[in-house]
Image (spheres, rainbow, N blue to C red):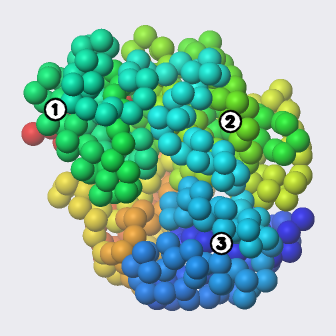
Amino acid sequence: MYKRILIANRGEIALRIIRACRELGIETVVVYSEADRNASYLRLADEAYCIGPAKSVKSYLKIDQVISAAEVGNVEAIHPGYGFLSENARFNEICRSCKIDFIGPTPEAMEKLGDKNTARMLAREANVPVVPGSEGLIESEDEAVRVAHQIGFPVLIKATAGGGGKGMRVAHNDLALKTALAQARAEAEAAFGNAGVYLEKYIERPRHVEVQILADHHGNVVHLWERDCSTQRRHQKLIEESPAPNLPPDTRNALCEAAVRLVRKAGYTNAGTVEFIVDQDNNFYFIEVNARIQVEHPVTEMVTGIDLIKQQILIAAGEPLPFRQKDIRQQGCAIECRINAEDPDRGFQPHAGTIRQIFYPGGPGVRFDSHVYAGYPVPPYYDSMIGKLIVHQPTRAEAIACMLRALDELQIEGIPTTVPFHKKVLQHSDFVEGWVDTKFVERTFLAG
């Protein structure tokens, strides 16, 4: 087992990893930018090193600075969390070349699955359904038009690198396709340094359902069931839950088994998430793999009782999984609301500022993962999420009621947050009945 781990991240996930390490008896070294100099979790770590100015490109994304801190801190492994360098295969390789374990998959598996087009080809080889589309990257407008006519409009143009909805466009005819193709390529090049795009059939009103997997270095691969992440805005998730509501048992089992097949085919190890879309007839299609821990991992922890961060660390240290597939059950229902420093009434505009007061929710089945406190200055340089509110109850109806009560208790003064918006969503009849697709938020709350 490791004695010291460096956490190459910030905010709530840094705090989450520190807590897991302390319970495992592992010392922690954290890195921080000048903007995070007063972060509360720095006091819980055994050592902390400033690695640069506020902007992430000069601090959290500076590989040389992170590696230097790891060497000075004399650590054996680095946990990248999510975002920043968590899916950077080059960083992964550099860690290993410096004799520091990267707590995640191998660089080879990361590269194989990090490129969406390559991942689609791998999925086909593993007999995992993919959305009908181009066989490879689109090289010209003529090829795009030809493929679109083969699979039928509307079509979705997707960047092969990156995520978060960047480099993604929908087209309903030839002219729109040509315009959208140029826009998607330009956006992908600017965001990821890779202008490669491919085409998929656009599935109307899909659900976004993902499967959490764990794979060790001894050939053991398990799934920890699924999460529904359909409540999202412009491809940014807002609310996640497990189990996925109204998903037939046969579909659930087939989807989870497909995720395991793909992970085995890729030779993947550690924690990962296989993402699918599910159409209105409950046909499912692979879309991508996230080769890291997910923001929404707590809902899986709550319904399975398995600590995913601890398992990541144990797997990286060479330990075999302590359970088999038959041991993993979904118990009750868990829901997570992402609490963002955003103003829903102004198009979800991010809002930096100082939190004057904050009152944490509590009670049975309530968990609030957050690093913020009264007097905390929310910086403008990073993602706007300031916490995750998670509830776990025996039934979905009870979980919704518990979440509404917890949102009422969560009082944050000084900045606007997404709390009021979450209350609206949770009380909408479509959400209550479990009939939410990825366009539900835009169609219901943002139309016009």
Q: Is residue 91 visible?
A: yes
Is 198 positioned to the left or the right of 84 in the image?
left
Q: Quadrant of the C terminus?
A: top left
Q: Percent x, y for residue 59?
A: 49, 80
* Mark 2: few/some/many CA within 10 Å (<14, 14-19, 20+): some
Which residue in the protein does label 1 denote? 178
Residue at left offset 54%, top offset 34%: 119
Is 147 positioned to the left or the right of 287 in the image?
left
Residue 416 occupies which quadrant of the picture?
bottom left
Residue 204 occupies which quadrant of the picture?
top left
As drawn, 109 above or below 366? above
Residue at left offset 84%, top offset 36%: 220
Q: Percent x, y for residue 162?
A: 43, 49
Local SS, label 3 = strand
Q: Percent x, y for residue 231?
A: 38, 38
Local SS, label 1 = helix
Which residue in the protein does label 2 denote? 266
* Mark 3: few/some/many CA within 10 Å (<14, 14-19, 20+): many
Label 1 is placed on what type of residue? Lys
Q: Quadrant of the N terminus?
A: bottom right
Residue 7 has which mark? 3
As drawn, 30 above or below 346? below
Local SS, label 2 = helix
Residue at left offset 48%, top offset 38%: 116
* Mark 1: few/some/many CA within 10 Å (<14, 14-19, 20+): some
Label 3 is placed on what type of residue? Ile
